[in-house]
Image: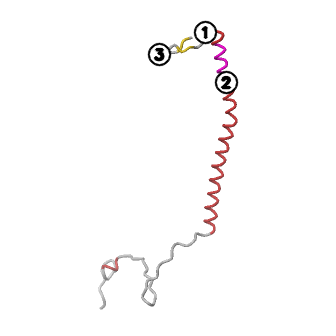
Amino acid sequence: MGLKTSRDGATFWAMNEDDTRIIDMTLDGEFVTPSGPGKPPIGARVMLWTIIAIVLAVSLSIIALTLWFVAMILPVLLVMGAAGYLLMRYQVWRSGQGVRWRGPGGWRR
């Protein structure tokens, strides 16, 4: 005769649960602690360090290009600013009037 099973094939309701946990025990009755995750494979470690090196190289390249651009454009901007100031002073001198502070009203030519 045997045990009668339910429609889904489990004899007891507890057998319906899919429990994949494993409890390891020594012969002395103590539980074995699972070891932590091991070292990743050598290929994964090489890939990680390669990605880090590429990111650092690209970052340093961007920084170097930015500093190079600033070093090239700064003297041009300084010369243009000085030339603009001198031309403005020449225009004021040529008009025969100086630039004076008039007070709360603003600049006077």
Residues shaded magenta: 80-91
Please, is residue 50 above or below residue 82 in the view? below
Is 82 left or right of 16, judged from the image as shown? right
Task: Look at 67% across and 19% down and name the residue there.
Answer: 86
Instruction: Inspect the magenta stretch and tell me whether residue 87 lies in it.
Output: yes
Other residues around mark 2 within 10 Å, as few (<14) / some (14–19) / many (≥20): few
33 relative to 61, above or below: below
Q: Say which amino acid is labelled 2.
A: Ala
Q: Quadrant of residue 16?
A: bottom left
- Residue 38 horizontal side relative to residue 29, left or right: right
* Image vertical order of residue 77 relative to residue 26, above or below: above
Q: Secondary structure at mark 3?
A: loop
Distance Cα–Cα, label 2 vs label 1: 21 Å
Which residue has dot 1 on it?
97
When the figure is inspected, residue 85 is found, relative to residue 46, above or below; the finding is above
Residue depicted at x 65% and y 21%: 84
Q: Which mark is residue 82?
A: 2
Relative placement, left or right, of 31 versus 77 is left
* Badge 3 amino acid: Pro
Of callouts 2 and 3, the N-terminal one: 2
Name the secondary structure under disc 2.
Answer: helix
User: Is-magenta flag for residue 43?
Assistant: no
- Distance from disc 2 to disc 3, alpha carbons, whole Å, reads 29 Å
Task: Examine the residues drawn in magenta and state their main secondary structure.
Answer: helix
Pointer 1 local density, CA inside 10 Å: few below 14, some 14–19, many at least 20: few
User: Residue type at mark 1?
Assistant: Gln
The spot of residue 53 in percent (x, y) is 65, 56
| Tag 3 residue | 104
| Residue occupying the point 42% across, 77% down | 21
| Residue 87, x across and y down, in percent | 66, 17
The quadrant in which the N terminus is found is bottom left
Q: Secondary structure at mark 1?
A: loop
